[in-house]
Each structure stands twice: as structure tokens, then as C-alpha cells.
Amino acid sequence: MKQRRLWGILLLFGCVTLSMATLAWSEGWEWGEHEEHERSSFLRQTAGVPPVINKAYKNECSACHFAYPAGFLPERSWVKIMGTLDDHFGENAELDAQTVTEIETYLRSHAADRAPNRFSRSIVRSIGSHNTPLRITDTSYFRRKHGEISPRMVKGNSKVRSFSNCLSCHTGAAQGSFDEDGVKIPGYGRWDD
Ligand code: HEC
Ligand code: HEC
């Protein structure tokens, strides 16, 4: 009888250890995304996406929406966006040539393919090399991260309306923080899963 109990406890320990190891492994998989060398470069990464520092960008590109951090799209996307401002998601967002050059230079040098933080790296990896998305919300990284949020919390929510309104849920977005802990969906409160 005593020995049976001992075996039971050992078995329980084994299960707990195994599931903890699996959890650790799957988490590593999440941000490591199949790449072996990822772990060594992890230490060099910064924690979040750097907030916007360019004045012209902040002034001109936040009239209709939040000035999205440059580190959320690759360089080629920003080039395309800045080259098609006359037809910008159904709006005319044209600017004079000098301002376009200044903003484009800023966005390119801080683009996701140049930013050493975990979000930017994951976004770049989630985009096929032949794709040039014009939307952060179109990347598979974004879709994966927001896949559990129901339409009634976004489209059907008058305080959100569109996933493009990052600020309405990410309370720290202006400071460059997109951590899950800082998420608060209007009308639904804090996000914990
Ligand atoms: C006249 C209004 C207006 C201005 C000015 C404007 N935008 Fe936009 N932008 C929009 C609209 C409308 C959308 C689509 C939003 C939606 O679908 O909810 C959009 C979407 C975007 C998106 C995609 C967001 C997503 O869904 O991931 C990016 C990136 C973007 N704008 C960049 C810029 C940049 C860079 C500038 C400055 C050069 C700029 N915008 C200025 C109206 C504007
Ligand atoms: C309707 C609310 C909502 C909107 C709008 C929204 N998000 Fe999120 N976002 C969330 C929630 C909730 C999570 C956490 C999801 C999870 O992991 O369970 C999240 C997660 C994220 C993450 C991953 C955080 C991490 O630590 O892994 C990033 C990055 C992010 N959002 C960026 C954005 C950007 C950029 C925009 C705008 C283009 C945006 N989000 C718009 C609700 C929102």
C-alpha cells in the first residue's frame, strides 16, 4: 500500500515536470519561431516597439488616426504607403514633397526590418518576402495576436470600430507599450486570458 502511494506521487511529479517543460518549450516556440539562433540574439533585443519621435510624422500622420510605430511594418511597406498618399485607404493624405521625404526617411530608418525588438522581428517573419502589406492589421502576426477577439468587441463596439484604432485598446500604445497587461477593451475591461 505504502509503495503504491510512493509510485503515485512519483508519477504526479513526472507529469507536472513534463507539462512545465512543454509549456516552456511552446512559449519559446512562440517568440523563437523555429529559429535556433533566436535565443542568443534575444539578449540584444529591446523590450518594446520604440515610440514615435519624429515631429513631422507625429504632426502629419496623426490627424486621422494614431501615428503607428514605424517598427510595425517593413521598410518596403512604408515606401509604398508614402508613395500613394493621394489614395490612402479612400482618403487624400497628400503632403508636400519635402515633408514626404522627411517622414519617409524617418519611417524607413525605424522600420520593422531594422528594429531589434521582439514584435518587429515577429512581424517581419510573418510577412512573405513578396508581400508588401499596407496595413499592420493585415499581417499574419497581427491576425494571430488578435484572433481571439470577437467582432462585437471591435466592429460592433462604437468606441473601437476598427482594429486600426490601436489606442482604443492598448492604453500604453503612445509610449510604445503593446503588452497584454496594458490592454483594456472599451466596454469589456481588462483583457486576461
Ligand atoms: C485624411 C486622413 C488620414 C491621414 C492624414 C493619414 N491617414 Fe493613414 N489611414 C487613414 C484611414 C481612413 C485608414 C484606414 C483606417 C481603418 O481601416 O480603420 C488609414 C490607415 C493607415 C494605415 C494602416 C493601419 C492598419 O490597419 O494597420 C497606415 C500604416 C497608415 N494609415 C499610415 C499613415 C501615414 C504614414 C500617414 C502620414 C503620411 C497617414 N496614415 C495619414 C486616413 C488617414
Ligand atoms: C479591440 C482591441 C484591440 C485593438 C483595436 C488592437 N489590439 Fe492589439 N491586442 C489586443 C488584445 C486583447 C491583445 C492580447 C491578445 C492575447 O494575446 O490574448 C493584443 C495583443 C497585441 C500585441 C501582442 C502583445 C504581446 O505581448 O504579445 C501587439 C503587438 C498588438 N496587440 C498590437 C496592436 C496594434 C499595432 C494595433 C493597431 C494597429 C492593435 N494591436 C489593435 C487588443 C486590441
Image (tube, helix red, strand yellow):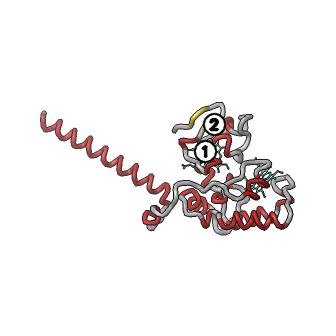
Front in this rendered view, residue 53 or 151: 53
Q: Amino acid at mark 1?
A: Gly
Residue 14 location, x and y as percent? 27, 46
Residue 173 location, x and y as percent? 63, 47
Q: Amino acid at mark 2?
A: Ile
Q: Residue at x 76, y 58 (%)?
A: 56
Q: Which residue is mark 2?
A: 185
SS type, badge 1: loop
Q: In terms of sequence position, does the residue under pointer 2 or pointer 1 come before the other?
A: 1
SS type, badge 2: strand
Calculate the distance from the C-alpha at mark 2 to the C-alpha at mark 1.
Answer: 13 Å
Q: Residues within 10 Å of mark 2 (few under 14, many from 20)?
A: many
Q: Residues within 10 Å of mark 1 (few under 14, many from 20)?
A: some
- The label nearer to you, 2 versus 1, is 1
Q: Is residue 84 left or right of residue 160?
A: right
Q: Which residue is mark 1?
A: 172
Front in this rendered view, residue 14 or 111: 111
Quarter of the image that includes the N terminus: top left
Residue 48, above or below 11 = below
Q: Is residue 27 left or right of residue 153?
A: left
Query: Does the Cβ of the disc 2 residue fall within 8 Å of ligand 2?
Result: yes
Q: Residue at x 71, y 47 (%)?
A: 164
Q: Residue furthest front?
A: 55
Residue 8, above or below 139 = above
Residue 36 location, x and y as percent? 44, 66
Residue 142 location, x and y as percent? 62, 52
Residue 3, above or below 66 = above
Q: Residue at x 43, y 66 (%)?
A: 40
Q: What mark, if any, has residue 138 been given in the picture?
A: none
